[in-house]
Image (spheres, rainbow, N blue to C red):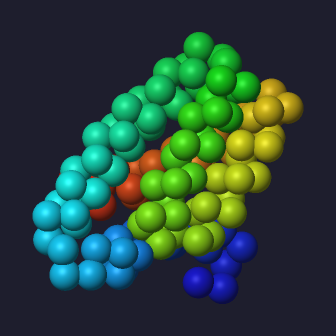
Amino acid sequence: MNTPEKYLEEVPNLSYILALAKNDLDFKFQFITRLKEEYAVDSLAYLYHMEVNEPRAASEIVNKLTYTLSFLSMREAYIFAERHQENLRMANTNLHPQFNKILVTVHTFLCKI
């Protein structure tokens, strides 16, 4: 991961969630279920705001999505998302294609667990 776009190569994982849950399987299940539900809503809201050209509204959703990236131990994607959020606040949407790739990666991962 020595490329400038290492956030695109990052693989989500459950290490943080597993450490948080320890041996509490019920907590782990509930946490992951809630994460999947919120991610589905937030990612669709982000895409909607981008589609209707509302970058400032999309930036608020990116803020929520950073929590998902953090929970999935995606440090580089988290840092990139913060930069994207700042750009969106200034109505700059040029990082949307890369951020969308991160969203697809997360979606694929969440569908598998």
On screen, residue 79 above or below 94: below
Identify the image quadrant of residue 57: top right
Residue 40 image point, x, y percent:
34, 38
Quick check: can you spot residue 11? no
Identify the image quadrant of residue 71: bottom left
Quick check: can you spot residue 20? yes
In the depicted view, which residue is nearer to us: 106 or 16? 16
On screen, residue 67 above or below 90: below
On screen, residue 12 above or below 80: below
Q: Is residue 72 left or right of residue 89?
A: left
> Furthest-top residue in view?
52
Quadrant placement of the C terminus: bottom left
Residue 55 image point, x, y percent:
70, 26
Quadrant placement of the N terminus: bottom right
> Furthest-bottom residue in view?
2
Q: Is residue 103 left or right of residue 84?
A: left
In the depicted view, which residue is nearer to us: 55 or 15? 15
At 62% from the left and 43% from the top, the residue drawn is 63
On screen, residue 8 above or below 64: below
Residue 33 image point, x, y percent:
22, 50
At 66% from the left and 17% from the top, the residue drawn is 53
In the depicted view, which residue is nearer to us: 97 or 25? 25
Q: Is residue 8 left or right of residue 15?
A: right
Residue 100 image point, x, y percent:
52, 45
At 40% from the left and 57% from the top, the residue drawn is 105
> How many numbered dots are placed on residues in this image?
0
> Furthest-left residue in view?
26
